[in-house]
Amino acid sequence: MDLKLNGKVAVVTGSSKGIGAGIAKAFAKAGAKVVVNYASSKEGAEKVVNQIIKNGGSAIAVHADVTKSSDVNRLFEETKKVYGQLDILVNNAGIFSFEPLEEITEDSFHTQINTHVLGNILSTQKAVAMFGNGGGSIINISSTVSQNPVAGLILYSAAKAAIDNMTKTLAKELGPKKIRINTIAPGMTETEGTHSGGIIGSDLEKQMVAITPLGRLGQPDDIAKVAVFLASDDSNWVTGERITVAGGLL
């Protein structure tokens, strides 16, 4: 077994299900101790933790709404209390909803932007303060729609584009501290969300598969493998990059 993350501690926001859960489990398999963060699904987070522990890993579940600084402070304080250090942050927490222009409200704007952009900033601030002298690795989760938007996703697409830009900006700002920051941009991925949202089995799924060169939807593990690379020393000369993980879909 290749324990590329042995001895490291990772916080993965929004990891009670979907891509976040896949990343958390892959990190644990690679030897990291993992903090599984959740905002609403305590049951899902505990399920991920139990799977990690059952497979011989170490993980805890911590509730925190990443849009609230008090919650984010508690998330990282609990990480330090239990594991004593931090080496990796994955900013995965996010929400996805189709919302055409005429349906956007102040509340829906703040829900999307606060979760994806403010939450990312607040978590990154605490992680940078907690990383040791050896630096750390931050991985942001974007989307193919940050560069190739889809009608009805103006807020989600704009938020993900902001994440792309923040990654490049912070790579320059944090490089002197030996902190690397990169972005993964998944294409459509089969998760609990795409099932509950009615995408799986729909015409939209068929359309997405048809325009994806590798001819299928992504799986959380497809994304997680790239996250392990970016979290590990294998990528110690990589920062400020956006890696599309979408089977050839641009």
Image: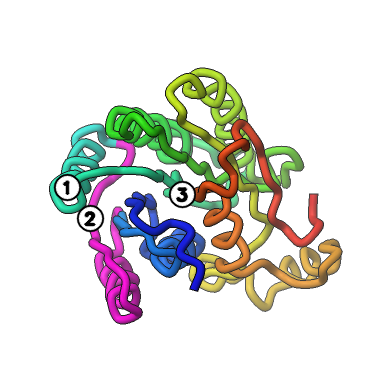
Residue 138 location (% of width, % of height): 47, 39
In reply to whether residue 231 is colored magenta, the answer given is no
Q: Is residue 206 visible?
A: yes
Disc 1/disc 3 C-alpha distance (Å): 19 Å
Give the image quarter of residue 214.
bottom right
Find disc 3 in the rendering and name its residue.
Answer: 92
Q: Magenta span covers which residues?
A: 38-67
Find disc 1 in the rendering and name its residue.
Answer: 78
Residue 66, compared with residue 225, is above or below; it is above
In the structure shown, which secondary structural element does the residue marked by tag 1 occupy?
A: helix
State the residue at coordinates (55%, 26%). 171
Q: Tell me whether the residue at label 1 lies in contact with that at label 2, contact meaning CB atoms closer than 8 angstroms.
A: yes
State the residue at coordinates (58%, 62%). 225
Left of 122 or right of it: where is 146? right
Amino acid carrying mark 3 in the image: Asn
Residue 29, compared with residue 236, is above or below; it is below
State the residue at coordinates (72%, 46%). 150
State the residue at coordinates (46%, 49%). 92
Find disc 2 in the rendering and name its residue.
Answer: 62
Left of 103 or right of it: where is 82? left
Question: Going from the N terminus, do you reach mark 1 or mark 3 first?
Answer: 1
In the structure shown, which secondary structural element does the residue marked by tag 3 occupy?
A: loop
In the structure shown, which secondary structural element does the residue marked by tag 2 occupy?
A: strand
Amino acid carrying mark 1 in the image: Glu
Disc 2/disc 3 C-alpha distance (Å): 15 Å
Question: Going from the N terminus, do you reach mark 1 or mark 2 first?
Answer: 2
Residue 214, compared with residue 223, is above or below; it is below
In this view, the residue in front, 5 or 40, is 5
